[in-house]
Image (tube, helix red, strand yellow):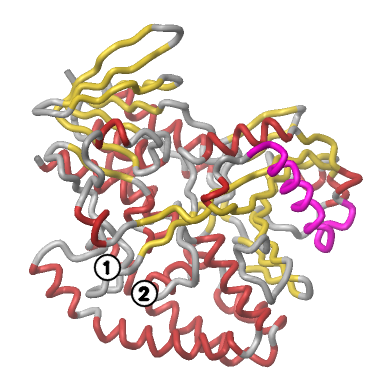
Amino acid sequence: MYDLIVIGDDLSSHVAAAVAAGYGMKTVLVAEHGTGGIYLADDFVFSTDPTPLSGFGPTQTYLTLLAEIDAPPIERDAKLLNPAYQIILPEHRIDFFNDKEAMINEIAREFPLQAREINVFYEAAMKRSAVFARWLHEHPFIKPLGIKDYYNYLKLVPHLLMQQLERARLLRTLAADAALKKVFEAQDALLGNATGCQSGLASSFQYCTPFRGVYKFQQGKQIIFNSLINKLEDRNGSYLSNCEILNIKRGENIEIEIAVGAGNTSVISAKKLIVSTKWDAMHLLLKDKKKINFGDWFNPVKVSHLPFTIHLGCARKCIPEKMSRHVAVVSDIQRDIFDNNLIILGANMTDEDAFAAEKISLTATVFLPHDSAGWPKEKLSAESSAMIDRLEFFLPFLKENILFFDLDKSIELSKKSHRVFNPKYQLKRSFITGFAARTNRTRFKNVYLTGASLLLDAGFEGEIISGMNAASRVIAQ
């Protein structure tokens, strides 16, 4: 009998399991499909997740978590990226540097007529970002949970009003220049987990991500997963992967039937259960229940777009020297960002001299409408060809320098990634607070949720915090 079962392949589930184990709970993490931060093929090393990683600086979210649970350190493997990322348009390229003045000068160089407004915006955004960061630290569920929280929320009202005035000014600036508007929309798509431009204090928090720092690991997210699994197992927890959950029995205790290998089944039980919102067999838990918590009725979250990634092994000579590890490429400044108009490039550099090497690993990711999740091969084959064609204005010699491309493997990895990496969500903000956050409680007293969709306002760091929140619920009981 375990104290806690955690179901999920995503980062949030790994965080929840590691934190619970770190606080003495006998925990088992069931990651049905196993983790995967890198893909190796023909001497190429691909990072399988295009998400820029933030929150890894001193005193920031992730390293604070590792220190709290005494997990193996990973900061020695982290490298701060500068620029944090790039936005490429047909006639513009913007490097988003860590230094505020350097970044403002960079945008002003590309958009001199809006230079003053850009400076005003980022000066204000830094202030609002600091306010939201403090709120997130003190209120990790983001939305107020009680009378005291609502009292503290009232102190935010002046900042919220100023934010709305500043946003209105920004929107007027963006309306005057379609290209600059696409720069901000591309940032929303690159950094956030929701479609559409963000609003509220969280938008400033996201736009100031370069100043907090974006980091890279040679092994991608895999080193993060490994660190959390090691902590879980060091505290006598269990990690189960490459298995299938067949059935869940709810009650005073939770019983889960698992298939492992050819025809072998076993049953594990625990007092409590944490489930990832990205788990694709949620119906086993719900059974006769159509919804899992009140928020699903009152403020439902919907998956709008899913990532599809192709993995290209290329000759180094077709890649620009100053290309960042993360690049958002916009093809047309007049079209909607999610109307086949955005490609997120990831250059995987395995060492400091990667750009001096003869070969380089490149990933290209688009977000396809959720209703196309059937993903027949012929559709994805046409999509991959279109992606390469659209990259021609940025990488004019790409086609003749592709040394490796396995479409079937890219399709397989993309489908598996939907249980691990974040899609794009649609969620209405709270009418009262304006926050995009949902509860991790469910209708079942011993079942909780975890996942990035619960804390959309916090971006990538929201997935980490969501796992911590779920663990804190079960530890407190």
Q: Which mark is in front, 2 or 1?
A: 2
Residue positioned 67% across, 31% down in the render = 409
Tag 2: amino acid: Leu
The magenta-colored residue range is: 376-397
- Residue at 49% x, 50% y is 423
Between 349 and 444, the residue placed more toward the observer is 444
Q: Nearer the viewer, residue 201 or 365?
A: 365
* Callout 2–callout 1 Cβ contact below 8 Å: yes
| Nearer-N-terminus badge (2/1) | 1
Q: Locate residue 398 relative to residue 288 in the image: left or right.
A: right
Prevailing secondary structure of the magenta residues = helix
> Does residue 316 appear left or right of residue 156 in this picture?
right
Q: Is residue 428 rendered to the left or right of residue 77?
A: left
Image point (40%, 55%), residue name? 302
Residue 426 colored in magenta in the image: no
Label 2 to label 1, Cα distance in Å?
A: 10 Å
